Image: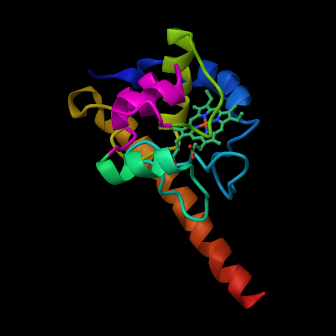
């Protein structure tokens, strides 16, 4: 399956307000009730640093779960059911109690997440060089700012 990021990132920003009760994203985002979601697309499940994940989420990451758009698309319907299916056990649990049923909302919010992620956001044939460059530029700006911040904090 391809092209979930074909959703509308601007509409997704509004949906993300719901996620924002638990998740932070973007520059300087910190773990909250849920882990930071910057660059979550392409990230192995259960691996954002210093976040205390539930056992099942960690186990899924160890089993090989990487958050591509299509996994997040399925996950958001019901994190618990997703993990139960992935780990093939009815004992699996998720610390995330939130569900997003609407397919359109899921597509849009994923497009929004993708605007904060460098990896695996769109299948290659759908990436136009200009969009790719713009995204890369934004990403680079963010990285540079973060890097500078770390240096500055060290010397403060
Ligand atoms: C009520 C709080 C809450 C809301 C609202 C919420 N989440 Fe979560 N989310 C969590 C928690 C807690 C976890 C950690 C799950 C675990 O460790 O079992 C999580 C985990 C995740 C993960 C896996 C991250 C990783 O590093 O493995 C993704 C992806 C995610 N959430 C996306 C979303 C999106 C997108 C939304 C909005 C549509 C959302 N969440 C709304 C609490 C929430």
Q: Residue at x 55, y 66 (%)?
A: 144
Question: In the image, is residue 146 above or below residue 60?
Answer: below
Quarter of the image for residue 130 reads top left
* Number of marks present in the image shown: 0
Viewer-nearest residue: 116 or 84 = 84
Q: Position of residue 16 (x, y in %)?
A: 66, 29
Camera-nearest residue between 88 and 134: 88
Q: Is residue 22 left or right of residue 70?
A: right
**Left or right of 52, for residue 7:** left
Residue 124 coordinates in the image, percent (x, y): 23, 34
Nearer the observer, 130 or 32? 32
Picture coordinates of residue 126, whole percent (x, y): 27, 26
Left or right of residue 136, residue 145 in this image: right
Ligand 1 is in which quadrant of the figure? top right
On screen, 114 above or below 7?
A: below
Is residue 43 something one can see in this rendering?
no
Q: Is residue 53 magenta?
A: no
Q: Quadrant of the C terminus?
A: bottom right
Across and down, in percent, residue 70 comes to 36, 27
Q: Quadrant of residue 149?
A: bottom right
For residue 62, side relative to residue 113 (left or right) = left
Q: Quadrant of the N terminus?
A: top left
Way the structure is coloured? rainbow
Check the image and report above or below for 126 versus 45.
above
The residue located at (35%, 37%) in the rendering is 87
Is residue 81 in the magenta section? yes
Front residue of 111/101: it is 101
Observer able to see residue 42: yes
- Please report the bounds of the magenta region as a residue range: 65-92
At x 56% / y 37%, what residue is drawn?
A: 94
From this viewpoint, which residue is outermost toward the bottom?
155
């Amino acid at each position: 399956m391809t092209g979930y990021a074909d959703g509308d990132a601007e509409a997704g920003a509004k949906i993300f307000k719901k996620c924002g009760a638990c998740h932070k994203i973007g520059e300087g985002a910190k773990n909250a009730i849920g882990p930071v979601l910057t660059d979550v697309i392409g990230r192995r499940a259960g691996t954002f640093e210093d976040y205390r994940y539930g056992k099942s989420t960690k186990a899924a990451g160890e089993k090989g779960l990487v958050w591509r758009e299509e996994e997040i698309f399925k996950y958001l319907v019901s994190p618990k059911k997703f993990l139960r299916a992935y780990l093939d056990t009815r004992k699996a649990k998720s610390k995330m109690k939130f569900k997003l049923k609407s397919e359109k909302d899921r597509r849009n919010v994923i497009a929004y997440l993708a605007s904060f992620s460098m990896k695996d956001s769109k299948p290659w044939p759908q990436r136009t060089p200009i969009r790719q460059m713009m995204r890369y530029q934004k990403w680079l700006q963010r990285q540079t700012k973060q890097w500078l911040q770390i240096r500055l904090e060290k010397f403060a």
